[in-house]
Amino acid sequence: MTIPPNNRLYQHVARELVAAIVEGRYAIGDRLPAERELALEFDVSRPTVREAVIALEAQGLVEVRLGSGAYVRQIPGQPIGFGITAFEVVEARLLVESEATALAAAQISDEEMETLSQLVDQIEQGHSAEDMGEAADRQFHLAIAGATRNAAIVRMVDDLWTLRSNSPDCAILHAKARAARVTPIIEEHRTIVDALRTRDPAKAREAMRAHLRSVLDQLLFATEEQAIEAARQAVASTRARFERSGAL
């Protein structure tokens, strides 16, 4: 498949799906082909298809119904644009926050270490109160950025977390993650604190990298869980029809 310059793969898939809708291949109310079929059609991975569908969902072009699939809601009247996805934000955080943590390790104070430990406790307590856990998680990462003594780094980390909260594409995927009961992993945060306590930049960098790689895996898991649950519900529906007909 030839991808236009400056296009990410999921964007190409999303544009192809929009073109198919505009051309009348899928009408309003029609269900798009299953994820597996689209992956084969476009010769891409299933996570890429999910990212494309999330992009269309964020713009109100399709509705994703758990256990059923993605349905066309409207035909776009103009070319679609793309927001920043949750995967892109985490990729950027991997670059920025890993190096920020390494820089922080060389100069973080004992008082800042204590603040980080308290924030990890708040994240853990916040598992039962979503907003509190999210706020503590953000403050944890901003506190590390603050320990770099570099205002530009603090600004970058803060902006990335703002994107995480405000981008419609991010919001949809994080909502799916919450529905799949994906929450911050406390031990990963404690490992970051322990690495910072050694004042070893390499250990601190790797601890943050490992954490953010895990975040990427969790987002993929969340979309996979949605797909698995959809398949389960489809199988249950089919079984129920057979049982009503006496075939089982």
Image (spheres, rainbow, N blue to C red):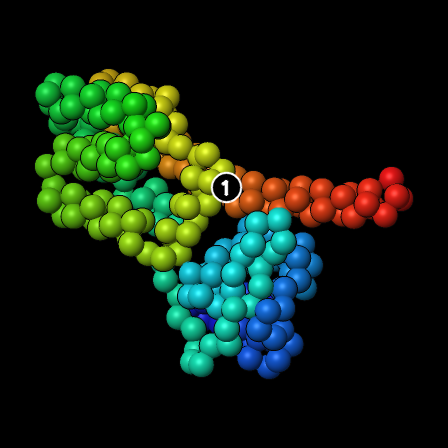
Q: Is residue 247 left or right of residue 146?
A: right
Expressed as whole percent of the image width and height from the top left, the position of residue 203 reads 31, 25
Q: Locate the C terminus by quadrant.
A: top right
Q: Locate the N terminus by quadrant.
A: bottom right
Residue occupying the point 56% across, 68% down:
72
* In the image, residue 226 above or below residue 11: above
Q: Between residue 11 and residue 183, name the one nearer to us.
A: 183
* In the image, residue 90 above or below residue 28: above
For badge 1, the amino acid type reads: Ala
Residue 192 in sight in this render: no
Expressed as whole percent of the image width and height from the top left, the position of residue 214 reads 43, 34
Q: Is residue 201 left or right of residue 87?
A: left
Q: Between residue 187 and residue 102, name the one nearer to us.
A: 187
Residue 140 in sight in this render: yes
Q: Name the residue carrying label 1.
A: 222
Q: Residues within 10 Å of mark 1 (few under 14, many from 20)?
A: many
Expressed as whole percent of the image width and height from the top left, the position of residue 13 reads 55, 65
Residue occupying the point 78% across, 43% down:
239
Expressed as whole percent of the image width and height from the top left, the position of residue 222 reads 50, 41
Q: Secondary structure at mark 1?
A: helix
Q: Is residue 142 left or right of residue 183?
A: left
Task: Kindly give the residue lying farthest to the right in the view shown.
Answer: 247
Q: Between residue 164 and residue 92, name the one nearer to us.
A: 164
Q: Is residue 219 left or right of residue 49?
A: left
Residue occupying the point 16% across, 43% down:
154
Total labels drawn: 1
